[in-house]
Image (spheres, grey):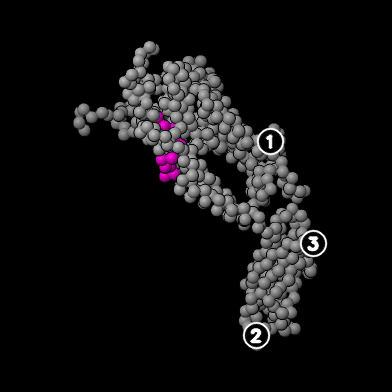
Amino acid sequence: MEKNQPQNKNDTGVLSLFKKQEKIYPKRVWGKYRKLKWVAMAITLGIYYAAPFLRWDRGPNAPDQAILIDLPARRAYWFWIEIWPQEVYLLTGILILAAIALFFVTSFFGRVWCGYFCPQTVWTDLFVWVERIVQGDRNARKKLHESPWSFEKIRKIALTHFIWLVIAWCTAGSFVLYFNDAPSLVASFLDWNVSFTVLAFVGGLTFSTYLMAGFAREQVCTYMCPYARFQSAMFDKDTLIISYDTERGEQRGSHKKGESWEGRGHCIDCSSCVQVCPTGIDIRDGLQMECIACGLCVDACNDIMDKIDLPRGLIRYDTTNHMEAKEKGGREKFRILRPRTFYYGFVLSFVAAIMLYALIARAPIELHVLHDRNPVFVQLSSGEIRNGYTIKILNKTHDHKTYTLSVSGLEGARVDINSAGDITSDTIYVKPDSVGTYHINVHADVLPSDVREIEFVLQDVVGKNSARYDSIFVTRRE
């Protein structure tokens, strides 16, 4: 290694190949986009913490929690929608729909999701706000962390971390409420009568929230989140992004009051845009992967422009085409309708239509039939052939149901239904929102073929709902 080559050594003098992560102290800023972020935070946190307590009447035989993932019962409830394990394709469709919607919005407004609605952004903003309230603004926090340990430093840092842990615990507790009846679980917490499983999940989620929002912060956006890596694939020159007007801003430099702006840029190199950035980047270097499009640098720059009596917009939301046209003296309009938005819009509409049809066409009952394997058939002393089947009936309604079962495609067939206690019945009873399992026998005369295709027909006694299932009836040649 050459002597003049810079070396990066750690505190022990050992050569390190990686630069130490610098702690970011975002400065307080106020403006239009900061207000929007507060509104977004209030709405998203309000929905997150309050949603488990919303009630939705589904009848006497179903939970009344509006949003619930009932793992013991293997059900997922979302207001009027109920998803069974057999309908996992609905969850897949919801995830696909959410992903396409994210791509669609990104093609218009860039990383607006990252800047305003991403959980990592929302909880990091909340933690930074607590840090600012307890320890002061940017310079005060930086000075406090660089100062030697003292009672005042220990008090402020301990209070900050205590509040963080309380927020993290409330966050974890609220998440668990989505998997349990919320009022009952809250009462269990108050009575100190909570299962170990719930406590383990709350503990793990508390730690992860505390770690991600308190320490990892911008590193999650930079290194862990895959969206930052491929988001540029959804951008084009008409996508709205955070932009620095280099034609107006350069050459940058300090400025004294009363000096002329002739022959120089409007950027006074105050670094306010860098100081307020939650990821610590300099937007004047151009669009970067770490930028989450929160708009705080816009607020900071506009505030400086107001103080030095210059027009706002040196840093602003803009499109590449619009900025290039402005540099050439033209007036390029914002293009909303373009090929990319048509593609995303079409796919989004197509998937949404499929999901809507799947929800509307959901059958309130399902029938599944499994032919016995041993023995495949039995020939009775009367000469009849008997086949055994195990049937499962999914009653997706919240009412008690009674059904009749018949067989088509087999002339003269007779169905025996064995219910609990081996009592033969003509009808089948299934409890609300449950699966009924029965063993049945189908009798028929000897047929000239080995296998006959048949169809089971399940009919609701008091309603028009029915279900069908194709199966076989096995016999033998004479």
Q: Residues within 10 Å of mark 2 (few under 14, many from 20)?
A: few
Quadrant where the C terminus sits is: bottom right
Label 3 is placed on what type of residue? Val
Compute the Cα span from label 1 to label 2: 66 Å
Residue 448 disc label: 2
Q: Residue at x 62, y 40 (%)?
A: 176
Q: Are marks 1 and 2 in contact (CB under 8 Å)?
A: no
**Disc 1: which residue:** 186
Image-quadrant location for residue 309 = top left
User: On the picture, is 117 further left or further right than 430?
Assistant: left
User: On the picture, is 360 further left or further right than 204?
Assistant: right
- For the image shown, how many numbered marks are present on the structure? 3
Q: Position of residue 16 (x, y in %)?
A: 31, 32
The kind of secondary structure element at disc 3 is loop
Q: Which residues are magenta?
A: 233-244
The kind of secondary structure element at disc 1 is helix
Residue 234 disc label: none
Question: Can the viewer see residue 364 in this picture?
Answer: yes
Magenta stretch: residue 296 in it?
no
Q: Nearer the viewer, residue 130 or 388?
A: 130
Disc with the residue nearer the chain's start (2 vs 3): 2
Label 2 is placed on what type of residue? Pro
Q: Nearer the viewer, residue 152 or 191?
A: 152
Disc with the residue nearer the chain's start (1 vs 2): 1
**Disc 3: which residue:** 462
Q: Position of residue 362 (x, y in %)?
A: 66, 57
Q: Position of residue 346 (x, y in %)?
A: 52, 51
Disc with the residue nearer the chain's start (1 vs 3): 1
The furthest residue to the top:
258
Q: Nearer the viewer, residue 312 or 275?
A: 312
Question: Can the viewer see residue 85 in this picture?
Answer: no
